[in-house]
Structure formats: structure tokens, C-alpha cells
Image (tube, helix red, strand yellow):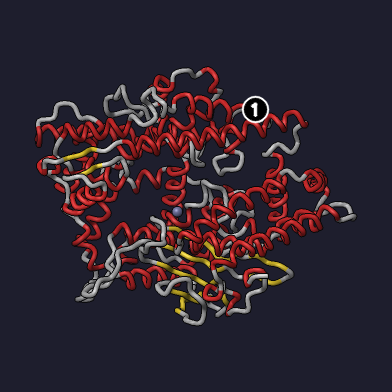
Amino acid sequence: MTILNKPFSTPYNTAPFSKISTEDYLPAFKEGIKKAKAEIDAITANTESPTFQNTIEALDYSGEELDRLSSIFFNINSAETNEAIQKIAQEVSPLLSDFSNDITLNEALFKRVKVVYDSKSSLTLTTEQETLLDKKYKGFSRNGANLPEAKKTELRAIDKELSQLKLKFGEHILAETNAYELHLTNEEDLSGLPDGAKEAAKQLAESKEKDGWLITLDYPSYIPFMTYADNRALREDLSKAFGRKGFQNDALDNQDIVLKIATLRFKRAQLLGYKTHAHFVLEERMAETPEKVTSFLNELLEKAKPAAIEEFKKLEDFAKELDGIDQLQKWDSGYYSEKLKQKLFDLDDEQLKPYFKLENVINGAFTVAEKLFGLQFEEIDTIDKYHEEVLTYKVTNAEGELVSIFYADFFPRAGKRNGAWMTSYKPQMIKDGKNDRPHISIVCNFTKPTKSKPSLLTFNEVTTLFHEFGHALHGMLANTTYPSLSGTSVYWDFVELPSQVLENWCYEKEALELFATHYETGEVIPMALINKIKASATFHEGMQTLRQLSFGLLDMSWHGVDPTAIKDVKAHEVEAFKDTSLYPDVAENCMSTAFAHIFQGGYSSGYYSYKWAEVLDADAFEYFKEEGIFSKTVANKFKTFVLSQGGTENPMVLYKRFRGKEPQPEALLRRAGLLK
Ligand SMILES: [Zn+2]
């Protein structure tokens, strides 16, 4: 038995990183799965008739050891990995998915769950318990547990085919991305690119033993070129190569795969008794129905379109004046937008960075949390870390009680994946009358300090820190009974509310004055700079909104209908884009055949949620602004009705309890400058 299969005798029961060796993980997982299975077997073997406690509750509390070691392992695999750990991840993942399938397909277990579910009306349950019961029941029914045997077999076949098609879809895009390169040997062709981007292009060429420069379809290479390269013909080449992925009628073509995926999802939904795939997905979302999503998107479209058209006209005039461009094309959008932005705002990161020393920004986030929620962050050195750069804190409330343990890991390293995220090492739950507090972590990849300079953040990094810190607060302030409903375990289109709402404080004078001070002089950031930040944040908001809405509408056009009649992917797409396109269509390009979010990842019928979350956060923050951005009353409501509640109730109910009414899009439109 490994150290991971025993109670940790550590301060606050924190993960014993220094005592775990890589060899421990695999046996620990095997043992953890064995124990979790035994716990499930104990539920099904129970001779007493099924009750909420002996079945639903027991199921939710089961597998605690396995969950705990999974979170430690997979967090390490993201933040401090190496080949050995990656190899274990590959071995462990199928074991875990087999285990979770064993639960979903466990008929004896479902039978007991169903007995409890069917007697729901006669049970005395708390709201949280009712939610848990629904969630557990649906975990089975949405996977076909209620279907007769033949249809179950059909469902499994669809699932299998879908997962293969999704894999293929992704492989094709990856192969197309890797197959293309723009090889430049004349330095003039890189005119306009910042030094960093040029350098990267040169290094890329060197790594492939080529002379000159290489540009690829990977974002870090593609985006700077489309934004800065003066050579319009090359931008056109690159843009068209990007847009052709999966749409070249060759072995890597995705058109058939798109049609098949949409059709199979529709069939699957019908098999389970839903009208469309979107109806199936949205049953477990705040937005509830495809009709609501579509009218939400169209309402925003109506408001954003006039602004978008106006912005487009101005951009066209600007490009005409600057370079005599008669018809703006897709490959001009990033380039001229950036030029216009520079002209209008003259704002770059170097001006702002001295005001955002990392330590000051962290303290700023902590001060905001203290002013809003009465939280205290005390740095501690008594608990284990997985890397010396990780900062560790004990978080307490105004009464001095432990709220959470908080880890913060800020700088890039070889073993860390890109991006920024919040995660947890231990969930919050109430078990046997004891409120077990969570261990929350944020991981980022921020600018590192150098010998002569501390870590100075770009403004984008500042908002990222607040964003992840908002997720972290959702985790830290969790106060629910059941672990699967705790903290950020909420509907997908609700989870970004706490994170996005926190970003708003980064734009407010009252908040910036608390932490945005020059690292050398101590001078508070000048108001003129704050105003520029705000103004540039809404630059081209109309066009950007239109673009986001177009993706959401395309998503719904594939998943909110019966797609069996769709035969031509491109024609279907052109029709779906008809109300949202500003640039001329490029006949040889197609979005759907490379729209990995919805055809490979988990965003099908969910793309709208980006805008949905923005509406929520803008509406919520407007409430703060009405009462003062540090209003204790509003903060307390936010904590009580949203942050502490996790997924215990329908998010619309929670939100209304906080706000007093349903979220309205006007706040977002106002913030975006789209409401005059
Ligand atoms: Zn987020």
C-alpha cells in the first residue's frame, strides 16, 4: 500500500508531495479503484431497500481516496510533468474510464437509484439532496440505462462510432496544420513583424534545418503574422491555408465526418427521447433549451450588428486611406484592426507593466477578496509543495476559521502545460457533521522575474490572474454537503460567472489604486492610462461580438435541428452565416470542417456559453457598481447565493436570488459600448 492509499498525516491534511514517488502512482490507482469498486459493491449488496442515504448519498461519498489521488496526479501531470508521469497517465486513463463505465452500466446500482428516484415525491429531501438525486439518476438515464437491450446496444455502437469520428476529425486537422508551412527567404516578406515573432520564425526554420524563416498554422506563429505582416498577398496565402483545413477533398477531408457526427448525435438524442442533440445537451445547462439559446444569440445580434457595420465601415475607410484597399478581405481584418488600434490608443504593454508587479497584483487580488468577503490570506511554509516556486497560503474568514488552503504557481517551466487554470487538490464537503475545507490551486504562465527586474505583468496577465482567482474563490467559499455539487461543479454555462466577474475590478479606479503602483516610484497608475485601458478594451467590440455570435449560430445550426437533410457542408454554413458575415466569403474555405470546439471537443450546443457568461458577469458587476464595487451587502449576497452554493440548485434560481431578477443583456451591451 502506497502513501496515497493512507490518510495523510500532514498539516491540514494537505497532499504529501515530497513523500510521493513516481512509482507510487500506478499501484495507488489500482488500489484506489479496488477500494472504490468495493464501496459500490457494498451499495448494491445492501439487503435493505434503497433509500436516499444508503444509495444516492453513499454513491456520492464513494471513491474519495481515488478522487483525491486522481486530483493530485492529474494536477501534477499538468503543472510539473515528465515522461514517466505522462506514461503513467496513459496507463491510468483507460483504467479510470473503464471504472466509470462500470458504474454507468451497473444495472443493479441503477435499479436502486431508480427506486429512490421514482419515490422522490414521497421523500423529505433538502433542495441539495433533490439536485443530487436528479444528477445521479440522469448520469444513468442520459447514458441509456432506461432503454431496452437492443436500443442500448445501438447507443453503445453510436457512442463508439462518435468517439472514433471525433478522433479522426482531430487527427485530420492536426495533419493539415503540420503539413503546411510558409517558407520565407527574403527578409522583406517579414516586414511589419515584431522582433519576437521574427526571431521565433527564424528559430522554427533552424529547428527544421532550413534557412530563412518559417510561418506555420499554429496560433503562436499564425496570429502574429496575420496581425503584423505588411505583405498582403502572403497574408492571403496564409489565411486561405488556415481556412482550408479539412476541406480539400483529399484523404484528410472532414466534410463527411462533420455530416456523420451531426447525424449520429441527432440519432443518439432521439434514441434517448430528445428532439435534437441540442435539447439533450441543454437539459443540463442554465440556458435550458435551443429556443432560448437561439433567441439569446439573435437578440444580441440585433443589438451588435449596427455597431459592427459601423466599425467595419470605419476600418474599410482606414485601410483605403492607408493603403488604397478597395475591398477589405478576411486576411485584412487583424492587420488593419491592429494598425487602427495603435493609432487610436497608442497603448502598449511596456507602458503598463511597471504598474503591475506580480507581488502587488497578488496582494491586490487578496485585498479585493478581503474587502468583499472578509478573507485573510496568510503565506505559510509548513506544507509540502510540488515545486519550490509554488506559493502556499492559509485562508481564513473574519472569525479566524479555516476557509481553504490555497496554492499559487505562476511561472512557466518545462514540465508545465500552457495557459492558466484553477484546480483543486481536495474538494469541500460536509461528512459525518464535519465541514471539510477545500485545497484550491491556480496555475499560470506569467512573465518571470529577471536578475534586474521583478515579474512585471502585462495587463492581459493581470486580468488572467483575477480570472483564475475568481474561479479559486468559487472553490474556496464552497459550502455544500455533497462533494459532487461543491464549488465549481456547476452547469457549464454558469462556471465562468465568478471568474469573469472578478476581472471587472481590474478596470476600476477604486480597485487599481489599491495595487497598481509603479514598482520603482510607488506612483499610482495615472487615470489617463486607466481610461485608455478601458477604451481599448471595447475596441471593435461590435465586430468581435458578431464573430462570436456567428460561431454560436453555426453550432446551433448543426445541433439544434434534424441534420439528416444537410448534404452540403459549405452551403449549409454559408446559410448559417448569412446574417453575421461582414467580409466576402472565401469559396475554398470552410469553418465547420475545422471547428474542433464543436466537432471534436466538448462545446457542441455550447458555443453560446462564452457570450452567455459575459452577459451574466456584466449584469452581476452592474449590481456591484450600483451599490459600490466594494459593497459588503452585494458581496455577501454573491457569496451566500452563488459562490457558496456550487451546483446545489438550478443556477437561474441562484442567480435570481442574488440579483433579484434574471440577467439582462443590457449591462453587457453598455459595457461593450454597444448601447448608445
Ligand atoms: Zn475560466
Quadrant in which residue 185 is drawn: top left
Q: Is residue 565 above or below residue 56?
A: above
- Residue 16: percent from left, percent from top: 56, 74
Instruction: Identify the residue shown where x is 44% and y is 37%.
Output: 171
Three-letter amino acid code of the residue under disc 1: Gln
Instruction: Identify the residue shown where x is 35% and y is 46%.
Output: 670
The total number of labels drawn is 1
- Residue 467: percent from left, percent from top: 41, 58
Residue at the spot of label 1: 270
Quadrant in which residue 222 is drawn: top left
**Quadrant where the C terminus is found in the figure:** top left
Q: Secondary structure at mark 1?
A: helix
Left or right of 347 in this view: 400: right
- Residue 146: percent from left, percent from top: 75, 36
Does the rendering let one see residue 637? Answer: no
Quadrant in which residue 485 is drawn: bottom right
**Quadrant where the N terminus is found in the figure:** bottom right
Comparing 235 with 621, the one in front is 235
Q: Is residue 458 above or below residue 326?
A: below
Does the rendering let one see residue 585? Answer: yes
Left or right of 197 in this view: 389: right
Ligand 1 sits in which quadrant?
A: bottom left
Comparing 189 with 559, the one in front is 189
The yes-or-no answer for disc 1 within 8 Å of ligand 1 is no
- Residue 447: percent from left, percent from top: 30, 64
In the image as oriented, which residue stretches furthest toward the front? Answer: 209
In the image as oriented, which residue stretches furthest toward the right? Answer: 47
Instruction: Identify the residue shown where x is 37% and y is 64%.
Output: 413
Comparing 140 with 83, the one in front is 83
Q: Residues within 10 Å of mark 1 (few under 14, many from 20)?
A: some
Comparing 206 with 459, the one in front is 206
